[in-house]
Image (cartoon, rainbow, N blue to C red):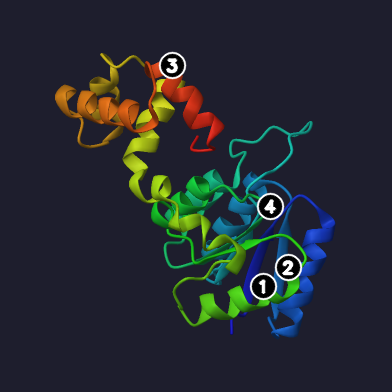
């Protein structure tokens, strides 16, 4: 079983539930972080000390307060942690139940498990930790499995999401090629980008790119 685990969550009650499970599983060292930046700092320090964390359990939403942070979401934290510690196992522990967001966590950030906070939280979290340790597949709360069968979820990939995100930031279709090349995103040719945007507009029945971004926000894609 894991011996060193980090819990990133800004609510004490959730920390207590997760720590209860880890204690039952005889995890020797458990650390906590209420901010994403704090969590990343703990990961970096553990690496420098030669005693890296083996598992990160993270929420997705962190409420803003007086403290300024560079990382403000679970997705940003997970991406940063993966760069620092590629072999760490990651379980998301959240109330988020939108299929697109969950699928992108598995496909884009390669998380090792997803637990929906709810009535069966304790049992499901314990099961997810054991599955992550044993490197088992389909490590997700049972009530969410049907969401991932949604046709829209399976047909929208990470590239499409990046494209819509940049459109939502005001990057025009004409300037997208330059931005994608700078960011190392491919395909990045003008024709490929136009083709993907047209595909998305047809798929979502959007009248224009503004309408496309609005639909994507409503569906929780971005």
Q: Distance from label 2 to label 3 (Cα)?
A: 39 Å
Q: Position of residue 107 (x, y in %)?
A: 39, 55
Q: Check disc 2 and report the residue beneath it.
A: 121
Q: In which quarter of the image is residue 126?
A: bottom right
Q: Check disc 4 and report the residue beneath it.
A: 95
Q: How busy is the neighbourhood of tag 4: few (under 14 within 10 Å), some, or many (20 plus)?
A: few
Q: Distance from label 2 to label 4 (Cα)?
A: 10 Å
The reply to whether dot 2 and dot 1 touch (C-beta < 8 Å) is: yes
Q: Which numbered disc flags the more N-terminal residue, 3 or 4? A: 4
Q: Distance from label 3 to label 1 (Cα)?
A: 40 Å
Q: Is residue 80 visible?
A: no
Q: Distance from label 2 to label 1 (Cα)?
A: 5 Å
Question: 101 or 79: which is nearer to us?
Answer: 101
* Numbered disc 1: secondary structure: helix
Q: How busy is the neighbourhood of tag 1: few (under 14 within 10 Å), some, or many (20 plus)?
A: many
Outermost residue, front side = 205
Q: Position of residue 166 (x, y in %)?
A: 40, 25
Q: How busy is the neighbourhood of tag 2: few (under 14 within 10 Å), some, or many (20 plus)?
A: some
Q: In which quarter of the image is residue 42?
A: bottom right
Q: Which numbered disc flags the more N-terminal residue, 2 or 3? A: 2
Question: 6 or 142: which is nearer to us?
Answer: 142
Q: Quadrant of residue 25?
A: bottom right
Q: Distance from label 4 to label 1 (Cα)?
A: 13 Å
Q: Which numbered disc flags the more N-terminal residue, 3 or 1? A: 1
Q: Check disc 1 and report the residue beneath it.
A: 124
Say if 48 sits above or below 63 in the image: below
Q: Is residue 59 visible?
A: yes
Say if 201 sits above or below 13 in the image: above
Left or right: where 174 falls relative to 74: left
């Amino acid at each position: 079983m894991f011996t060193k685990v980090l819990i990133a969550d800004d609510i004490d009650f959730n920390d207590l539930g997760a720590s209860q499970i880890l204690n039952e599983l005889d995890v020797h060292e458990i650390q906590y972080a209420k901010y994403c930046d704090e969590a990343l700092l703990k990961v970096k320090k553990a690496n420098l000390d030669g005693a890296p964390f083996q598992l990160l359990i993270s929420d997705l939403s962190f409420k803003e307060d007086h403290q300024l942070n560079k990382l403000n979401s679970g997705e940003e934290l997970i991406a940063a942690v993966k760069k620092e510690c590629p072999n760490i196992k990651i379980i998301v522990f959240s109330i988020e139940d939108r299929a697109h967001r969950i699928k992108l966590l598995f496909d884009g950030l390669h998380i090792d498990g997803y637990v929906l906070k709810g009535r069966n939280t304790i049992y499901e979290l314990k099961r997810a930790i054991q599955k992550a340790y044993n490197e088992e597949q389909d490590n997700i709360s049972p009530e969410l499995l049907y969401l991932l069968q949604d046709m829209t979820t399976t047909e929208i990939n990470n590239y499409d999401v990046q494209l819509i995100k940049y459109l939502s930031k005001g990057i025009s279709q004409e300037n997208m090629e330059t931005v994608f090349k700078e960011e190392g995103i491919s395909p990045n040719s003008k024709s490929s980008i136009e083709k993907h945007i047209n595909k998305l507009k047809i798929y979502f029945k959007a009248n224009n790119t503004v309408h496309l971004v609005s639909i994507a926000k409503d569906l929780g894609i971005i």
